[in-house]
Amino acid sequence: MGEKTLTRMDLSEAVFREVGLSRNESAELVEAVLQHMSDSLVAGEQVKISSFGTFSVRDKAARVGRNPKTGQEVPIQPRRVLTFRPSHLMKDRVAAGNKR
């Protein structure tokens, strides 16, 4: 399995090639979309992208965890976590190994 990571630069390059905007405009568009998504998540809203999945923020309660090496109990503070739930189409596509 490949270890390649998709970066912002890769996304803006794809927008440049597919849409035909300039490289600067493509980079600005990608940044604007990511910023809008981030702002919505910080505000507690869900971000749904059709045929891709849903990003949401979940509040997790405080709990007692355990250090697996020593067995010592450690308190874990309450926190907000980002979750992603892929759509059924995305799950099927990944399972089939489609590249496009």
Image (cartoon, rainbow, N blue to C red):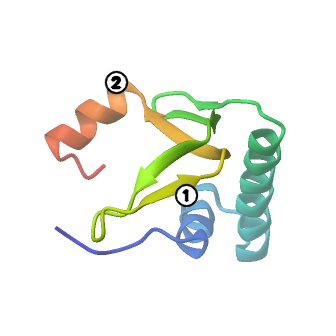
Between the residue at mark 2 and the residue at mark 1, the CA separation in whole angstroms equals: 26 Å
Return the residue nearer the eye: 43 or 2: 43
Residue at 56 percent across and 54 percent down: it is 75
Q: Amino acid at mark 1?
A: Glu
Q: Amino acid at mark 2?
A: His
Q: Along the horizontal axis of the image, is 17 left or right of 44?
A: left
x, y percent for residue 84 = 50, 39
The answer to whether residue 48 is above or below residue 13 is above
Q: Residues within 10 Å of mark 2 (few under 14, many from 20)?
A: few
The answer to whether residue 84 is above or below residue 87 is below
Q: SS at mark 2? A: helix
Q: Which residue is mark 2?
A: 88
x, y percent for residue 3 = 28, 75
Residue at 41 percent across and 72 percent down: it is 5
Q: Of tags 2 and 1, which is closer to the observer?
A: 2
Of mark 2 and mark 1, the one earlier in the sequence is 1
Return the residue nearer the eye: 21 or 10: 10
Return the residue nearer the eye: 17 or 77: 77
The answer to whether residue 98 is above or below residue 14 is above
Residue at 60 percent across and 45 percent down: it is 82
x, y percent for residue 23 = 70, 75
Q: SS at mark 1? A: helix
Identify the image quadrant of residue 94.
Answer: top left
Q: Which residue is mark 1?
A: 18
Q: Along the horizontal axis of the image, is 32 left or right of 73?
A: right
Identify the image quadrant of residue 68.
Answer: bottom left
Return the residue nearer the eye: 100 or 3: 3
Tell me the number on the disc at residue 92: none
x, y percent for residue 51 = 46, 29
Q: Along the horizontal axis of the image, is 25 left or right of 68?
A: right
Q: Residues within 10 Å of mark 1 (few under 14, many from 20)?
A: few
- Whether residues under marks 2 and 1 lie with C-beta atoms below 8 angstroms apart, the answer is no
